[in-house]
Amino acid sequence: DTEVTQTPKHLVMGMTNKKSLKCEQHMGHRAMYWYKQKAKKPPELMFVYSYEKLSINESVPSRFSPECPNSSLLNLHLHALQPEDSALYLCASSHAGTPGGLNTEAFFGQGTRLTVV
Amino acid sequence: AQKITQTQPGMFVQEKEAVTLDCTYDTSDPSYGLFWYKQPSSGEMIFLIYQGSYDQQNATEGRYSLNFQKARKSANLVISASQLGDSAMYFCAMREGGGFQKLVFGTGTRLLVSP
């Protein structure tokens, strides 16, 4: 099973709403990622979790709150978003290699297309 | 400074022909990995091929091969025998050092395969 599953596939939310994006993988990967991709742009890293601990936060605004409840699940909690936060949010997972260790690819989900109105 | 540069915003190729998508990179880290991903309109990023900085041979995966020229810092993707289903956005990405897949992506090349 080489799948990363993201739900929902589409989400429309108001600026005062609270919503969550979910991501699940069963490949035994211990690193999970959130990327944000604006239209016609490349993905940009937001957060990295390694062994269920937040390892990297790329200076993301606090209205985005990640959570990794276990090694298979990754959530992104959204609150008080702005219209400019509308984007495709991609989750990915990979082996959490040590420096000079495993060089394996990251597997991505299909993404959640988020529209903030 | 741009770490990954893809200079071709769009490429056209006829079915069954080969096509090369360009990618140059910039890093001072001796240990790095280079990846190519395909993104169809559905949105998911599909891994195609990987090249490590210490790999002696160019990577190949089916119809995909990577023309890795380390001294020139280029990692071009070659797709042989193009198919209509190859029409998509293609991203070159780099990971520096070991550990996490903290990927930095290029701006992408949109490939259109015509019958």
Image (spheres, helix red, strand yellow):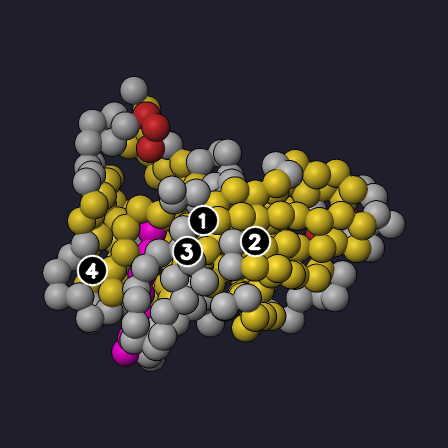
Q: Which residue is mark 2?
A: A73
Whole-number angstrom distance, CA of label 3 to CA of label 2: 11 Å
Q: Which residue is mark 3?
A: A28
Tell whether label 4 touches label 3 (CB within 8 Å): no
Answer yes or no: is residue B58 visible. yes
The mark that comes first in sequence, 3 or 2, is 3
Q: Disc 1 is attached to a residue of which chain?
A: A
Answer yes or no: is residue B97 visible. no
Q: Position of residue B81 (x, y in %)?
A: 19, 32
Dot 4: what SS? strand
Q: Disc 4 is attached to a residue of which chain?
A: B
Left-right relation of B108 to A14: left
Quadrant of the rendered structure where residue B73 is?
bottom left
- Magenta range: B30-36
Q: Which mark is nearer the camera, 3 or 4? A: 3
Q: Position of residue A38 (x, y in %)?
A: 60, 49
Q: Are marks 3 and 2 on the same chain?
A: yes
Tell whether label 3 touches label 1 (CB within 8 Å): yes
Q: Disc 2 is attached to a residue of which chain?
A: A
Determine the residue positioned at 25% across, 31% down.
B82
Q: Position of residue A67 (x, y in %)?
A: 65, 61
